[in-house]
Amino acid sequence: MSHFTPENFQTCTIGFLLGRTALVKDRILDTHLQDFGVTAAQFKVLIIVSQFAVDTPAELCRYLGLDSGSMTRMLDRLEQKDLIVRSRCPDDRRQVRVGLSEEGQKLADRLPHIGAAAMNELVGVLAPEELATLTAILTKVLLNAGDTLTALRVSEK
């Protein structure tokens, strides 16, 4: 179904609202993470490694939509903070594996609490049924757009 035309596109706000929501979400996350010395971008890497068992830079790039250079710099910063460790894959020395350090695991154990507080700040204004509707609508949009990670998450439930 087509909702937009060149004539009404100037008044279309959906792209703006989706983009602003992502930016505000990260800003709220940054505030909640400040005491831990971690950014929202670093939070995402740590949560993906800890909750989804992703252990290669290439997989992290796919999850986060980052290029390999950006991911390398991100992993460098997390390694400097002693939150991750990188090691060569024993089967293929060209591959690098990413894991949480002891300090990284301690922080990862707290991330669901931090993330929940940040998301409650973002969407706490919504009634439970509104949040369920928003989740269903965003899932539908992403699945229709062919987002494989959303499809994977939906199939896991």
Image: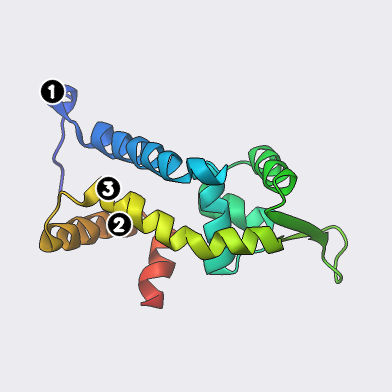
Q: Is residue 33 left or right of residue 119?
A: right
Tell me the amino acid under the disc marked 3.
Glu
**Circle 2 sits in a helix, a strand or a loop, which is it?**
helix
Q: Which mark is residue 121?
A: 3
Q: Give the residue pinned by disc 1.
A: 7
Q: Is residue 43 left or right of residue 145?
A: right
Q: Is residue 122 left or right of residue 40?
A: left
Q: Spatial distance from mark 3 to mark 2, Cα to Cα?
A: 28 Å
Q: Which mark is residue 111?
A: none
Front residue of 55/120: it is: 120
Observer able to see residue 2? yes
Q: Image height check: is 22 above or below 147?
A: above
Q: Image height check: is 130 above or below 157?
A: above
Res. 156 image quadrant: bottom left
Q: Spatial distance from mark 1 to mark 3, Cα to Cα?
A: 36 Å
Tell me the amino acid under the disc marked 1.
Glu
Residue 61 screen position, x and y as percent? 60, 50
Tell me the amino acid under the disc marked 2.
Asn
